[in-house]
Image (cartoon, rainbow, N blue to C red):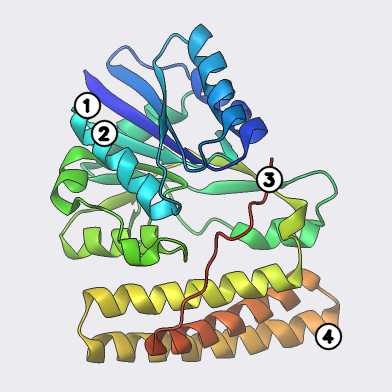
Amino acid sequence: MKNVFICVITCRRPQWLARLLDGLLAQQIDENIKASVLVVDNAQDAATKQVVEDKAATSAIPVIYDVEPQPGIVFARNRCAQRFLEEQGDYLVFIDDDEWPQSPDWLNRLCEGSDKYQADVVTSHVISVGEPGTPEWSVDLIYGNNPFTEGQFIDVFYTNNVLISRNVIASLNPCFDERFAMTGASDYHFALRAKHAGYRCVYIDAPVVEEFPKSRATIKWFCRRGYRSGIGYTRSHIFEESFGKALARCAVLSGVRVLRGLGKLIVGAVTGNKTKYVDGLFRLCSAWGTIVGFFGVKHEEYKVIHGK
């Protein structure tokens, strides 16, 4: 029997959380899997608590409500990991509150992937759909085309659709670094630590769907996201590698991002393709963020709550 904890971090998104919980509770779970859902509220929101209690009252599997009073996604993620270890879980699954599983066998696929490929971490991609009124160019850009194939071992994973075995959580605990509390990139940093510790991550075909909010569909938001991701990349490698190695790695990456960004920017401007144009700006901002990350610059990602 596999004891699986599905962990959801939420912050003032009760409607989207309710949709996600409906999708999780509709999963057709194999008999050899004992599943529980843990919702960690990072805002102590009464509407959020009510949603969880309502779903728990009619659910065939446990749905647990918990609060992380300290603001910051890092603290909420670490509370999930701590609760998971206390409950003797075998696998911890992270999914975001603006997502839902595409298929009713999503959880089964993640668990099967760990056994089939003898992997410590199993991940899959995210399919973006726009909130009503969201321009198509932004939906196309947010995740782009999925580059991975079933059974491919990869170096990077994020907490929007991932299964992590107990040995990874226990050995790297606390998993998420408080230096990334409000900046984002703590999951990239955790993946880098897992890679350096020798743990293997495999990609399988078990996507989730994400609703991309209209409020994010601006050039400014994508530029800020690129800038933040560049900073997060640099800080992660500085923390885990020698300064010289991190400097060389980030210098090469920023150069590649500049060249690709300029190419996409020019093509987008000439052809009128807004997706390519903004993608070029995103890459240029990411290159700049990669550079300024060496100077201790931080960018707070979670000041504004998007969604509902």
In the image, what residue occupies the spot 24% across and 23% down?
A: 2
Left or right of 165 on screen, residue 113:
right
Residues at badges 1 and 2 in contact (C-beta under 8 Å)? yes
- The mark nearer the N terminus, 3 or 1, is 1
Of 193 and 306, the residue lying toward us: 306
- The mark nearer the N terminus, 4 or 2, is 2
> Which residue carries the number 2 mark?
84
- Residue 97's spot in the image, x, y percent? 55, 39
Please tell me the numbered disc located at residue 87.
1
In the image, what residue occupies the spot 73% across and 61% down?
A: 138
Q: Is residue 20 visible?
A: no
**Which amino acid does the dot numbered 3 rest on?**
Gly
Compute the Cα span from label 2 to label 3.
Answer: 27 Å
- Residue 184's spot in the image, x, y percent? 46, 63
Left or right of 52 on screen, residue 140:
right
**Which amino acid does the dot numbered 2 rest on?**
Phe
In the image, what residue occupies the spot 48% across and 91% down?
A: 255
**Which amino acid does the dot numbered 1 rest on?**
Glu
> Which residue carries the number 4 mark?
270
Residue count near mark 4 (Cα–Cα under 10 Å), binned few <14, some 14–19, many ≥20: few
- Element type at marker 4? helix
Compute the Cα span from label 3 to label 1.
Answer: 31 Å
- Element type at marker 1? loop
Compute the Cα span from label 1 to label 2.
Answer: 5 Å
- The mark nearer the N terminus, 4 or 3, is 4
Residues at badges 3 and 1 in contact (C-beta under 8 Å)? no
In the image, what residue occupies the spot 32% across and 42% down?
A: 79
> Which residue carries the number 3 mark?
307
